[in-house]
Image (tube, rainbow, N blue to C red):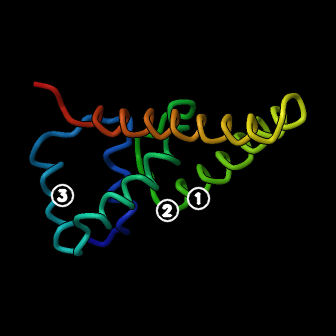
Amino acid sequence: MNRSTFSIIGDRYLDTQHGDEYIESLESELRRRGVAGLYRWLLEYVAASSLWWKIFRLDWCDLNETDIKIGWVQNLVTFGLAGLIFVFMINLCAGVVVFLALHILTTWIGFGLRAGSKLNK
């Protein structure tokens, strides 16, 4: 397979449903590359926490490391601005809480999107 690891992981976040055989081929390719255990969880976290925004821009083709970088920049800017607003309106603690709450919420959304790519029979 001539694709990046994040491109393979990104297939699970596409707005396309895949059959069990295709998903198993992705999983076996990731295992072949040594992507397992804590390292796999870390890559899934990075993907889920940055690809949640795809619900606003439906993507049917490919999500890869470029999309992940764009997602992290969007997260930092959006969450940072929301946090700064709360810092100025309330205090520093409120700003940090808002920043972290938004990150946790959107990561949860991202992991939920991952499960939606599996074809339901």
Q: Nearer the viewer, residue 104 or 29?
A: 104
**Structural distance between the alpha carbons of marks 3 and 2:** 18 Å
Query: How far apart are the two marked residues, 1 and 3, measured between alpha carbons?
Result: 23 Å
Q: Secondary structure at mark 1?
A: helix
In this picture, residue 112 sits left or right of residue 47: left
Which amino acid lies under the numbered mark 1 shown in the image of this protein? Lys
- Where does label 3 land, which residue? 27
Which callout, 3 or 2, points at the residue further toward the start of the chain? 3
* Along the line of sight, the residue nearer the viewer: 100 or 20: 100
Residue 59 percent across, percent down from the top left:
46, 40
User: What residue does disc 1 label?
Assistant: 69
Residue that appears at 35% across and 66% down: 5
Tag 3: Cα neighbours inside 10 Å, few (<14), some, or many (≥20)?
some
Which residue matches tag 2? 65
Secondary structure of residue under mark 3: helix
CB atoms at circles 1 and 3 under 8 Å apart?
no
Which amino acid type is shown beneath numbered disc 2? Answer: Glu
